[in-house]
Amino acid sequence: MIAALTTISGEPPVTVWQTETEIPDVDLIVIPGGFSYGDYLRCGAIAARMPVLEAVRRKAREGVRILGVCNGFQILVEAGLLPGALMRNASLKFVCKEVQLEVSNADTLFTKHYQQGEIIRCPVAHHDGNFFAEPDMLRQLEDNGQVAFRYANGTNPNGSLNDIAGIINRNGNVLGMMPHPENLIEAAHGGKDGYALFSAALGLAA
Amino acid sequence: MTSPNDIEITQEIIEAHGLKPDEYERILDLMGREPTFTELGIFSAMWNEHCSYKSSKKWLRTLPTDGPQVIQGPGENAGVVDIGDGDCVVFKMESHNHPSYIEPYQGAATGVGGILRDVFTMGARPIAAMNALRFGATDHPKTRHLVAGVVSGVGGYGNSFGVPTVGGEVEFDARYNGNCLVNAFAAGLAKTDAIFYSKAEGVGLPVVYLGAKTGRDGVGGATMASAEFDETIEEKRPTVQVGDPFTEKCLLEASLELMASGAVIAIQDMGAAGLTCSAVEMGAKGDLGVELDLDKVPVREDNMTAYEMMLSESQERMLMVLRPELESVAKAIFVKWGLDFAIVGKTTDDLRFRIFHAGALVADLPIKELGDEAPEYDRPWRETGLYSPLAAHQVEEPEDYGAALLKIIGSANNASRRWVYEQYDTLIQGNSLQLPGGDAGVVRVEGHPTKALAFASDVTPRYVEADPYEGGKQAVAECWRNLTATGAEPLASTDNLNFGNPERPEIMGQLVKAIEGIGDACTALGFPIVSGNVSLYNETHGEAILPTPTIAGVGLIPDWSQMATIGGANNGDAVILIGGDGTHLGQSTYMRECLDQADGPPPPVDLLVEKRNGDFIRSAIRNGQFSACHDISDGGLALCLAEMAMASDLGMKIELGADNGPAHALLFGEDQARYVATVSSDLANFLCMNAEGAGISFRRIGFVEGDHLTIDDHLSISVKQLRHAHESWFPDYMDADTSLAAAE
């Protein structure tokens, strides 16, 4: 993720240690993928209780853009910054493959460089990406246009309800998604479909 | 629960430690007294086959290990090879066979953890992993359970740690029914001026314990791995270690940070035989003694004895010799990463290995004799009988060529491995250029605009069994060929030699002849062995595995924009066969899958032709002349073409002609040193002229067209149908009713 952000923005991002209590002024906060604390308790559960997450919450309230990818999405959910839960994949297996995503809401800070309904390629790599929400919550997410990305054309890899791959908060400044757009941003990756998400989030040209 | 150190050493105890009577005599001679219980445990850990290579050392010495590109050959945690620009690649392959059979998830996971640690102990950041897995017959009741456990264990560790798994092998054969093989490979990148070694230097310096705490897991693991299996196998479960990839990830970051601080003089990871092996190696290599105070060792269980602490194989631990003036800097780094840091001893000048526990001296041993002067055997060996030549006309032709190809492509050993590799993170780190499913995994070198590294792992055990010398050669040649088929220049290799009980002359003969073949091929191809591992005693109830010398290699691609893949063919491209027509059906996949036979010698490898053809292929790829390239191996030309067609999602129209030999040999012959390339029609003549000029055997056999693979009037199968057969086997097998497995 650091390499991708460096490639796209032209400069390396500032990194912040988990025990920090302040986050500097930035355009975008990214919580990348990985296996924080080994995911032994529940994915993201311990990371969401680290001191830095308090600072992230503050920034979220201030309207700073926050992107959580994979484990980052799980941490945002555990931290209460996004609704729902990410359960074990329906297959009960880790899955790493390319899927197709439908841009279900192109009218967000993160997705505005895509067309509404556009289908993009994107890799996934996770063991616990099966999005779940109670029926009321699910309805709200749909009604409010909070579903940013949906697995398309039968490529749902994990059993997520409504094929949900990524959701955004009510204020529109926090996006969490299981797929890894940072691994499809240059020719070496075999495609650039993920680039537009970062260019939008960073306020760069499409 | 605790075993006092003054426990009497009986005949039974000596045998239980895997020590032979003459070895025990030697211990008595060395010490001039009876060893204590802890001392006996230490000898057993150091002198077992797994740690001492006592049966194989004599023969391993004959392998070529040098070359201008080699910075470090065998003898360290991993081999180191120069890739230019001040960078080097650090790699090794190691087996975790016995633990994986006993407890597949943790056995495989800690195999991955161990090999990653070997690589970052040298100062390298891991960038790629592979694994060569071999399981019993598909209808054996344990096979599904082992496949599921091993695959999720490999993924569970590698994915969490954050290294992409870019290649490997999965094979099934009844000869692995009682012993599966898990050979794990890892490679990392380091700077050539910042490589770290295990040789301790300086007297009176602190010996520091780093990483996770010591528990009772894995006690005696290395000794277990040096014995055959029998019905007591279930009792051996406690000898398997338990992995924690998150701690390993922290250990990686902390170790690299510590190395950058300049505090590290010597470093050794705790793998087999844990604290014992790491301390002895650091001391023996540096001609120093080591003193350890076990009361300082961080433990996670109460009342551990000296014996248990010295033999524990708890994971994610390191031992270092540090510069005393930087001790506080070092400690701060480890505290930040949440890891244990304890000074547990010091180096001495008297070449003794002394262990104190609860204030008492519990072991006092000569360190050199434990380490580099372990016993070495010249075991009796004899060559196995070879098969008589088998001409193609002696082998039955298939009634239906299409059915034969579909059968091969959908068979357990040749079907797609997607079910396996989709459970591995192949993309993490964002540098993967070629994923599993092609000839080699390719990862670009981060920080360099054009360079990439290719990785492949190969061996054809049925060839090695039929002729250990030719089979050994072939394993090296195929690995070299797979790297070449991406456009990489093969740099160096690592060998993981899996065999049965070396005390049986016919098994020892397989090992000796396979090493000879490996050595000859590595010399001829300029592909030295820079690291490796030997796993013997892979037997259950006296039945040995197929001899399996796995060869994993690394190649350098100077400019990845000019690499080849198996799937880049375009409509209208010419299809060119390089290296001659298929003639050899002995030990072929065709015979095994379609005739249920294993007869004849394996295909011989002409190393000069191999080199010449490979050099031609590499140069054509680097000049951008191929749209796709694939080597011909198992299943011959037909399987190669089918794989290329599926990868490109395009058909091919192939004409082999009736005058070039029997059709089944042309289609399914496994002659070596061969490739198929697709070339745009305007370059085809030029390429053929080049091949002719270079003295390369080549033939235009058709072109890329439509959506069917058509070969003369022998077969015509849609790419869709090929893919269905190829992709179905693995998921169908793993999802099938498991009542068979449950009935065990």
Image (spheres, coloured by chain):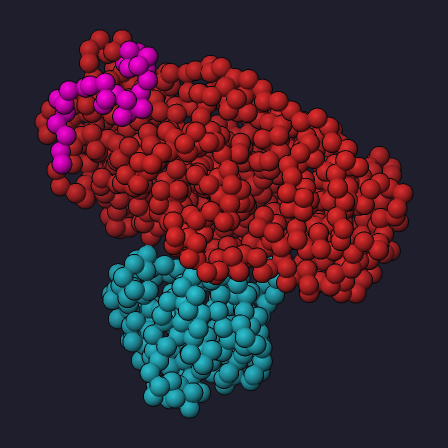
- On the rendered image, what quadrant is the C terminus of chain A found in? bottom right
Q: Is residue B17 magenta?
A: yes
Q: Please provide percent x and percent y for residue B263.
A: 32, 36
Quick check: B370 above or below B116? above
Q: Please provide percent x and percent y for residue A123.
A: 52, 65
Q: Specify start and end residues of the magenta stretch as a single range.
A: B1-27
Work out whether residue A99 or residue B382 is closer to the camera in this orientation and state it.
B382
Q: Name the outermost residue toward the left.
A: B359
Quick check: B588 above or below B199? below
Instruction: Name the residue located 44 percent from the left edge and 70 percent from the top edge.
Output: A158
Asked if residue B162 lies left or right of residue B409, the reply is left
Chain shaded cyan: A
Asked if residue B128 lies left or right of residue A141, the reply is right
Q: Please provide percent x and percent y for residue B399.
A: 76, 51
Chain shaded red: B
Instruction: Name the residue located 74 percent from the left edge and 31 percent from the top edge.
Output: B390
Instruction: Name the residue located 33 percent from the left edge and 29 percent from the top edge.
Output: B223
Quick check: B1 above or below B447? above
Instruction: Name the residue located 54 percent from the left edge and 69 percent from the top edge.
Output: A99
- State whether residue B210 appears in this view: no
